[in-house]
Image (spheres, rainbow, N blue to C red):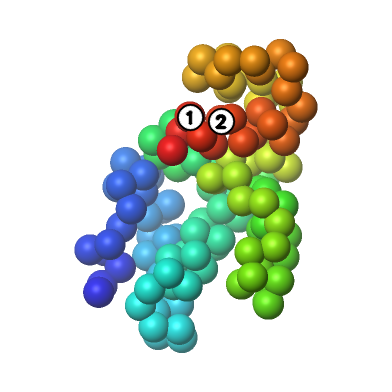
Amino acid sequence: MPADKSLPGTLKRSPRKAQETWLKTHDSAVEEYGDGERAHRTAFKSLKVGWEKVDDHWERKNESGPSDPRSTYRGKAARDGRGEALGGVDYYGHTKAELYDRARELGVAGRSKMDKLELARAIARKQH
């Protein structure tokens, strides 16, 4: 299936550059691995280097780099799902205070007792 037909909804509401990043990587991954989950995972991993999911769309990150513990792994470890994915929340690119502010805006209950990782998880659940 052509990638532009399978563009996820969050990307349809995102800047064209984010869409192009995902589409280009997805098309390349389909050629390499075939259509399916692996091509989608590869496209999202590429997207998350420079973009972060905010509410129902993707926004450019202030600094490129890994966004969550899973994105720091490569090869077999990445394919096996080692590390935790945080739904596009830029865990490494934000301070605890910044994540707390986002959690407050989203109405996350119990946020004052959460550590940074728990805040990122809660934000990801609310945005999903």
In the depicted view, which residue is nearer to us: 22 or 36? 36
Q: Residues within 10 Å of mark 2 (few under 14, many from 20)?
A: many
Q: Are marks 2 and 1 in contact (CB under 8 Å)?
A: yes
Mark 1, residue position: 126
Q: Is residue 53 visible?
A: yes
In the depicted view, which residue is nearer to us: 34 or 111? 111
Cα–Cα span, label 2 and label 1: 5 Å
- Res 75 → quadrant: bottom right
Mark 2, residue position: 123
Whether 108 is drawn above or below 123: the answer is above
Q: Which mark is residue 65?
A: none
Q: Percent position (x, y) of residue 91?
A: 68, 40
Residue type indicated by callout 2: Ile
Image point (36%, 48%), residue name: 11
Residue type indicated by callout 1: Lys
20 displayed left or right of 105: left
Image point (66%, 58%), residue name: 71
- Res 115 → quadrant: top right
- Secondary structure found at label 1: helix
Q: Percent position (x, y) of residue 127?
A: 46, 33
